[in-house]
Image: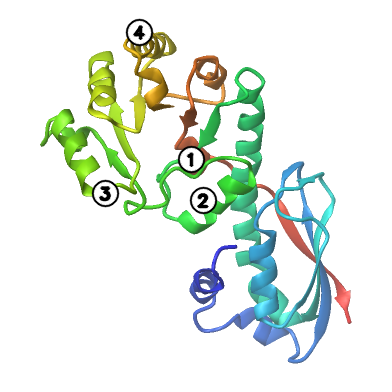
Amino acid sequence: MVPLSYLLRFIEEDAPFGDVTSEAVIPEGMDAKALIIAKQDGIIAGVEEARALFEHFGVKVEVRKRDGEEVKKGEIILELEGNARSILLVERTALNVMGRMSGIATEVRRLTEKVRTVNPKVRVAGTRKTLLKPIDKRALLIGGGETHRFSLSDAILIKDNHLALVSLEEAVKRAKAFSVYKVVEVEVESLEDALKAARAGADVIMLDNMTPEEIGEVLEALEKEGLRDRVKIEVSGGITPENITEYAKLDVDVISLGYLTHSVKNFDVSLEVIGRV
């Protein structure tokens, strides 16, 4: 679960000096019942995060749908009972978290199932193109995807801007010497550089912004040199839900898409107060 301390920052941002509407309108001490309901079909996520937020403010929570489960439009996800002001204070933050996480999880599940119909071994991953990493990375996992690097501290990924300053071979050599525990990945955009990376001992080669035909040529060349089994092949750049299966048909290990965190639509959930207690 995303740490409660991280989630509480959103409450503080949303109500830095309290919820003045509820304080003005709702009598202190009034209790209420409420439901959180799915407004569309999909994969629900962020349930544990919403539960933790409500319980932190003293609201009783009954979980009806758990993270990673399929939900249908109109189904109840959570039942809430407690102080009315507390329910309304947490409402928007909880819905925002669930909406974002469920949107990501739903799309990850859809794309994962889509690519595995043509290549059962391929994995779908997100990227670091997000500022809400704890939330987005957990949503990727709930949907059945891979998180790639969580941060710059997790793995060594040598990109074009590194290679503008240091040769590919030298960069891999230095990276391998730096740590025996860190995976070394190299981003390349040509057959020549892919072979250089494999020969230099890279653990993962990211084929960036290459067409399926170009990737096929790289895979064939690696096979011919006896290097294919020594590296994992990741493909990224220019991949969309519409063309992803063309990449999945190839002998690749991972397909990564920034789209999963920077362009996915929120999942529609709502909170409905059903009365006083």
Q: Which residue is the extreme one toward the bottom?
A: 28
Earlier sequence position, callout 1 versus callout 2: 1
Earlier sequence position, callout 2 versus callout 4: 2
Q: Closer to the observer: label 2 or label 4?
A: 4
Which colour assignment does the render follow?
A: rainbow
Q: Amino acid at mark 4?
A: Lys
Mark drawn on residue 126: 1
Name the residue that disc number 2 marks: 137
State the CA–CA distance, disc 1 to disc 2: 8 Å
Q: Is residue 188 left or right of residue 44?
A: left
Q: Amino acid at mark 1?
A: Gly
State the CA–CA distance, disc 3 to disc 2: 25 Å
Which element carries disc 4, helix, strand or loop? helix
Name the residue that disc number 3 marks: 179
> Which image quadrant for residue 82?
bottom right
State the CA–CA distance, disc 2 to disc 4: 37 Å
Earlier sequence position, callout 3 versus callout 4: 3
Give the residue at x 84% y 51%. 75
State the CA–CA distance, disc 3 to disc 4: 30 Å
Q: Closer to the observer: label 3 or label 2?
A: 3
- Nearer the observer, 105 or 91: 105
Earlier sequence position, callout 3 versus callout 2: 2
Q: Report how many numbered discs are placed on residues in the image.
A: 4
Name the residue that disc number 4 marks: 224
Mark 2 burial class by Cα count in 10 Å: few <14, some 14-19, many 20+: many
Earlier sequence position, callout 1 versus callout 3: 1
Which element carries disc 3, helix, strand or loop? loop
Q: Dots 2 and 4: beta carbons under 8 Å?
A: no
Q: Dots 1 and 2: beta carbons under 8 Å?
A: yes
